[in-house]
Image (cartoon, rainbow, N blue to C red):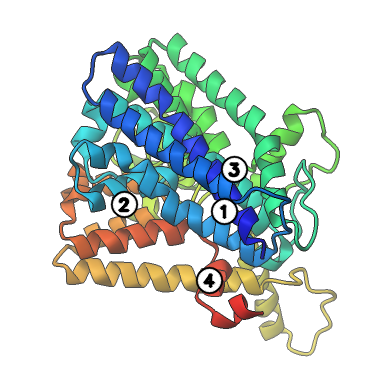
């Protein structure tokens, strides 16, 4: 399994987190915020632990199979947030609340327990956005390197612009994915930041919004959104919201002028679903008034990319939750079940209906050759969603709030909770440590594949 390689990889991840704390430290120094000491101490601890992991794993790296790769993924989503939470813990926040904020950021969920502090503290706001951005890049790399393979998604997809290798090379594949995506990811974020600056957004607010939106985090400074600075800000954000839910392999290949083999059924389906959701939201908000259509189209893109940032009239909660459950493309920073899986499910449904209508007909080769991973993920998603809703309603919360809260964490689209009347204050509406732990588990499971989640608790998988 390559334990030393796994320790080294996790150490590198901690070093990246520690170095990323430098920016909040610089900002805190510039505005004379006393939390600078908290971030400096947290950065030192994170860098020390990261360097220690790298030091004790010195030597020739060993091959890493699928078990090692899943262990790295588990460490990234479960253990790394402990270090991301250190600035909040050192500043006096309870550990469970600080850990919740960190998990929410690294999984790009954008569900805050400390809703007021998340936007009132400038270093804290920036650190959450940075963690979302890093988490978004990690999600892209993990999806492209491990999860978007026929065994998980049922059908062949666009080949990534890097070498994935075969067995015993999963960790190398993740590294290749990070290097391959990093430049384009930075470019899109920078363009978004500059575009917001041109739309009269303040420098820091534009930076936080760009970092979060490109990562599908939906975290926008200020409770009234970017449209406070300029009525053109939503239009500026729209293409970046769309890109955050689109297939990043397609984006990278297009920008690098590698336009061969760009057949991608998922992106077209993603765009069509957005149009359908926008039209439905417009109908429910008062069809016939064309002035409402642009805002609802923006909301449809935001929901499908699981950003959850809403403008204009509040959209239908039911349609919004369905949209974030569908989610964006498989290799994107978006959460949800992903459009590619729905394509597989719909194809299989069509084939089964044909078999029911014409049981003796010879209908040719089946279009879906390997969809077991899709159905396992669909089953896991459905069961976990039901369990989360049951747990929240048992805690005394309304069905509407429980549904929004459960879908928000499992689809990594936390801001949708603001569409409920009770959830206007964010996830701090849910009280009690057990409830917070369950929500944290929901956010992590939302980023794990169903097959991977089952494998992690399967004893024979680790013994094989």
Report the residue marked by disc 4: 456
User: Which of the two discs, 3 and 1, sits closer to the camera?
Assistant: 1
Q: Which of marks 3 and 1 is nearer the N terminus?
A: 1
User: Which of the two discs, 1 and 4, sits closer to the camera?
Assistant: 1
**Distance from the alpha carbon under mark 3 to that under mark 1:** 41 Å
Is residue 222 in view from this perspective?
no
Q: Give the residue drawn at x 60%, y 49%.
A: 8
Q: Which mark is residue 271?
A: 3
User: Which of the two discs, 4 and 2, sits closer to the camera?
Assistant: 4
Q: In this view, does 19 lie to the left or right of 329?
A: left
Q: How many C-alpha atoms fall within 10 Å of the one at disc 3: few (<14), some, or many (≥20)? A: some
Labelled pair 1, 4 in contact (Cβ < 8 Å): no
Q: What element carries label 2?
A: helix
Report the residue marked by disc 1: 7
Q: Give the residue drawn at x 53%, y 48%.
A: 53
**Distance from the alpha carbon under mark 4 to that under mark 2:** 34 Å
Q: Which mark is residue 421?
A: none
User: Which of the two discs, 3 and 4, sits closer to the camera?
Assistant: 4
**Distance from the alpha carbon under mark 1 to that under mark 4:** 18 Å
Q: What element carries label 4?
A: helix
In the foreground, 65 or 324:
65
Q: Is mark 3 on a helix, strand or loop?
A: helix
Q: What element carries label 1?
A: helix
**Distance from the alpha carbon under mark 1 to that under mark 2:** 43 Å
In the displayed structure, 380 sits above or below 292; it is below
**Quadrant of residue 202 within the rendered picture:** top left
In the displayed structure, 333 sits above or below 237; it is below
């Amino acid at each position: 399994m390559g334990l030393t390689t796994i320790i080294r990889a996790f150490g590198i991840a901690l070093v990246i987190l520690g170095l990323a704390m430098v920016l909040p430290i610089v900002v805190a120094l510039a505005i004379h915020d006393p939390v600078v000491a908290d971030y400096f101490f947290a950065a030192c601890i994170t860098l020390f632990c990261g360097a220690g992991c790298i030091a004790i794993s010195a030597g020739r790296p060993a091959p890493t199979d699928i078990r090692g790769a899943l262990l790295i993924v588990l460490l990234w989503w479960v253990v790394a947030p402990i270090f991301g939470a250190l600035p909040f813990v050192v500043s006096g926040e309870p550990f469970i609340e600080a850990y919740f904020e960190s998990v929410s950021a690294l999984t790009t969920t954008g569900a805050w327990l400390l809703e007021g502090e998340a936007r009132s503290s400038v270093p804290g706001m920036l650190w959450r956005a940075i963690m979302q951005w890093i988490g978004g890049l990690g999600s892209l790399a993990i999806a492209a390197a491990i999860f978007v393979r026929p065994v998980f998604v049922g059908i062949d997809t666009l080949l990534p612009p890097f070498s994935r290798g075969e067995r015993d090379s999963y960790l190398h594949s993740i590294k290749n994915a990070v290097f391959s995506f990093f430049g384009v990811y930075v470019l899109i974020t920078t363009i978004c930041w500059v575009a917001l600056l041109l739309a009269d957004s303040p420098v820091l607010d534009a930076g936080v919004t760009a970092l979060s939106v490109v990562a599908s985090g939906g975290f926008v400074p200020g409770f009234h959104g970017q449209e406070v600075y300029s009525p053109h800000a939503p239009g500026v954000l729209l293409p970046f919201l769309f890109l955050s839910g689109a297939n990043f392999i397609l984006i990278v290949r297009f920008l690098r002028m590698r336009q061969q083999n760009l057949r991608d059924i998922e992106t077209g389906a993603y765009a069509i679903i957005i149009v359908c959701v926008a039209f439905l939201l417009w109908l429910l908000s008062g069809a016939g008034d064309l002035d409402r259509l642009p805002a609802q189209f923006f909301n449809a893109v935001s929901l499908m990319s699981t950003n959850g940032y809403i403008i204009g009239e509040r959209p239908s909660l039911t349609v919004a939750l369905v949209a974030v459950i569908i989610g964006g493309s498989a290799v994107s920073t978006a959460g949800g079940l992903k459009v590619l899986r729905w394509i597989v499910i719909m194809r299989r449904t069509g084939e089964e209906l044909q078999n029911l209508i014409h049981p003796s007909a010879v209908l040719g080769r089946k279009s879906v050759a390997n969809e077991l991973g899709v159905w396992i993920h669909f089953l896991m998603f459905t069961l976990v969603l039901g369990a989360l809703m049951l747990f929240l309603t048992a805690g005394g919360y309304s069905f509407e709030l429980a549904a929004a809260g459960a879908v928000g964490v499992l689809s990594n689209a936390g801001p949708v909770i603001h569409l409920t009347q009770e959830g206007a204050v964010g996830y701090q509406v849910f009280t009690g440590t057990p409830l917070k732990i369950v929500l944290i588990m929901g956010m992590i499971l939302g980023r794990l594949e169903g097959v991977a989640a089952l494998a992690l608790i399967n004893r024979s998988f680790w013994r094989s």
